Image: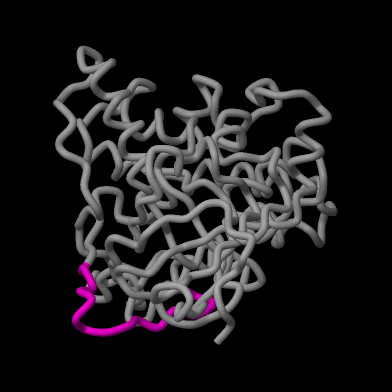
Amino acid sequence: MRTRSKHATMEAKVTAVFQRRTDLGDDTENHKKNPTTFGRIRVLPETGPLRVDRMGLSGSMEFHRTLRSKKFIPDEDDDERSVLVQTTANCEKIAAYAHENRRRLQQALGVLSAGSFGENLHVDGGPDFHAGNLCVGDEFEVVRGVHPDSTVVARFQITSPRRPCSNVDVKHTGTYTAHGIRAFTARTGYAGMFVRVLEPGTILEGDAMRLVARPHKEWTLLRVSQLLYGDHTAVMRYAMHPVRREEWQGSQDELEALADVPTLAVCEYKDELFQLLGRPPIGRYKMQSSAAEGTGGWRVGTVAAITAVGIGAVAYAALHYS
């Protein structure tokens, strides 16, 4: 194992590790799923380090690992959402929002603690370790032990904000409007972030995540979320329909630049940007347009894909990260 990087500028402690339950029916042939909201099992440190590889935590069953995901996530993109990470500072931002908007919420927001957002890892890096200061492409070494005896046990890279599903509103305040917690976290990136596993290894409560590379400092998770899902209509309909050009919150140059960020996740981000730009479809749009490609090329296929997304969107939204 390598020793710790001398260039780390941000650090967060892993305060909790969670596996998603494997007994929820996610990978059965009939795809019937037991109803649950964020069914997670906390992995206690006394059980020892947990293996983490390109698909995520050992013994965990997230959406991207299920048979059902094959309708939405191509094999070449199935490692871009390997681990879902939530931060204490994100939760503090959410709590502050809920307090300021308490008259608009159906119920009071409860105490947000590790696991409240169905994450695999909860980390605490202080008040600045939130979506406004974390960027697409950021690389983190997972470090165990105390310097000078610490070792690097894995390496992660941020691929996108977590675009929350309706289960966030089910879990938090029951407010299914643009003022609800799901909509707020979708347009800010505070629901968490997905990371790709660049170097497999192990993870353990108490490990540290240290920033070692930042190739796209201009693309914070907050900025990406605001540009793509900041529109009032877009944030309420993204599970049902693709984002429309008039809903994009930035310039044409920003749209093209974000679409070209190589480390940005395809699912729910780059696939949306490509369709906004009229580029050949990728991700779920490519998969759902494949049947039409033989008769009309990719543009006809894209129309078919968008129609298919609308038809199947309720199921798609219900599948995610419960």
Quarter of the image where the C terminus is located:
bottom left
Instruction: Please report the residue visible at 70 percent of the width from the left and 38 percent of the height from the top.
Output: 218
Q: Quadrant of residue 179?
A: top left
The answer to whether residue 97 is left or right of residue 55 is left
The answer to whether residue 179 is left or right of residue 284 is left
245 lies above or below 308: above
Instruction: Check the image and name the residue furthest to the top.
Output: 103
5 lies above or below 173: below
Question: Which of the two residues, 15 or 224, is positioned nearer the viewer here?
Answer: 15
Q: Quadrant of residue 241?
A: top right
19 lies above or below 248: below
The verdict on residue 92 being magenta is no
Quarter of the image where the N terminus is located:
bottom right
Instruction: Please report the residue visible at 21 percent of the width from the left and 31 percent of the height from the top.
Output: 174
Image location of residue 11, percent across then percent down: 47, 55
The answer to whether residue 109 is left or right of residue 248 is left
Question: Which of the two residues, 19 or 67, is positioned nearer the viewer here?
Answer: 19
Instruction: Please report the residue visible at 81 percent of the width from the left and 52 percent of the height from the top.
Output: 298
Q: Quadrant of residue 83?
A: bottom left
75 lies above or below 247: below
Question: Start and end of the magenta stretch?
Answer: 41-55
